[in-house]
Image: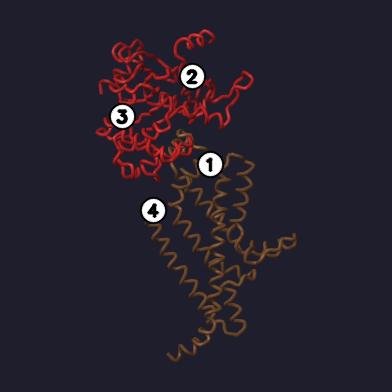
Amino acid sequence: MQDKAMENKNAQEPIVRFEKVTKAFGELVVLRELDFELGPSEKVTVIGPSGSGKTTILRVLMTLEKPNAGVIWVDGEPLWHKEVNGKLVEADEKHLRKVRGNIGMVFQHFNLFPHMTALRNVYEAPVHVRGVPKEQAIARAQGLLEKVGLADKQDQYPAQLSGGQKQRVAIARALAMQPKVMLFDEVTSALDPELVGEVLGVIRELALEGEMALLLVTHEMGFAREISDRVIFFDNGNIVEQGPPKTIFDDPENPRTKQFLGATLRH
Amino acid sequence: MNDLREFFDFAYIAEILPDLLEGLVVTAQASLAGFGVALILGLLFALARRSENGWLSQPVGALVEFVRSTPLLVQLFFFFYVLPRYGIRLPAFIIGMFALGLHYGTYTSEVYRAGIDAVERGQWEAAKALNFSPMDVWVRIILPQSIPPMFPALGNYMVAMFKESAQLFAITVPELMSTAQNIGARNFAYLEPFTLAGALYFLISYPSSLLVQRLEARYAR
């Protein structure tokens, strides 16, 4: 623990660190004493069988699920805990909000606010959460919609948009909060196949820009290989194998990884 | 035509109509004010019952069930005769408005509850991921999308309440029903005032019901 801290000071302090994080739903253990780190601008993809708990990694980090045990650190601060006199105690809502602000998330089912236009979906949180002056937030939101190729859709409501367009608005909405870490939870799984490309294109661009740390859960293996610095094969509540995409996809060591990739790539 | 004139005294009707219209105005005022109370109380009840704090949700739940399971008339009498014994003297109109609002607030709270439950979990999660404060989550995300689909159900309760406001007659509020009763008693002729009162209720309720039906078509999910 001590050595690790020293080492990280010299190298790069991880933006996210899981320490023996456990999450169970009743009898079902979905995260099993998970240790995991994410570098400040690292792009990491988590792959694995459905129901293996990989989405739960994102959900405990976004504070949508509370871990049963372990500590999660975000940018040097504990997420679910507060340090009081050198001890970690359960965090209150105020602390959660402060640390949560470093993280953004894009969901499988978009979850756009149906009563707001695309533009307002993007600028609402910056104005009311961050206190950005409205005109400035709108200008920035327009810039973000342009970036995701939807400048002409700013006045449409979510119901008037296609799935791919909704997901691109959702990405712009998450970006508007300028998170240090962005989570993508199977963001193309609910899309018609012909719309997957436009969403992946936007994420690819973010990956190339390079600043933000990205953590993706996806079934798009080709995409994972292309944009990731590191790929994690996750199964049964923990990391089975991880490494550069080339190693994981071309030369996996673990038989479970081989079996999973064999089954996936054959399709 | 002669028969009808014998049966129905049109001169009498012309004479009592202005008084009845005044009664109708009081009925409308009591209904609108009472419904305003019902809308606010209903929302507060619904939010309180959703609270994770059992010390809040349990008693409010019990109160709602109790009020809903007892007649409005009993509640009216209770407030009208019991409150003054504890030194709370309020005009009959205010008591009527509050009792209607409380009674119907227990119904509207169910409408709110169902409407709020209908909001997808993903909306709460997206709101949290964007770090909205708990208050903003309600005010900016959840309520604005859950309330419009409630309009038809709320409208139905408003029409029902408008008709039931006739019970305020029992606590001397000078609304339409008690006006008709007084006119009848004064002239020993009840047919015309009550018929006219019924017609006036109908003239307001029926178009209102049609309006609610149009809301239903518009906000049907």
Closer to the camera: disc 1 or disc 2? 1
Q: Nearer the viewer, mark 3 or mark 4?
A: 3
Q: Earlier in the sequence, mark 4 or mark 1?
A: 1
Residue topped by disc 1 = B135
Q: CA distance from mark 1 to mark 2?
A: 30 Å
Task: Sort mark 4 into few (<14), some (14-19) or many (20+) by Cα contacts within 10 Å.
Answer: few
Q: Look at mark 2 in the image and give the residue it sits on.
A: A18
Q: Which residue is mark 4?
A: B220
Dot 2 crowding, Cα within 10 Å, few <14, some 14–19, many 20+: many
Return the residue nearer the eye: B181 or A87: A87
Most extreme residue toward the top is A3
- On whether disc 4 and disc 1 are found on a single subunit, the reply is yes
State the hue of chain A. red
Residue type at mark 2 is Phe
Chain letter of mark 2 equals A
- Which chain has been coloured brown in this picture? B
For label 3, the SS is helix
At a point 40% along the width and 15% down the height, the residue shown is A240
Toward which corner of the image does residue B97 lie, by quadrant? Answer: bottom right
Chain letter of the residue carrying label 3: A
How far from the left and from the top, in percent, is residue B26?
56, 70
Most foreground residue, B156 or A2: A2
Q: Nearer the viewer, residue A228 or A40?
A: A40
The type of residue carrying mark 4 is: Ala
Give the label on residue A202, or none. Answer: 3
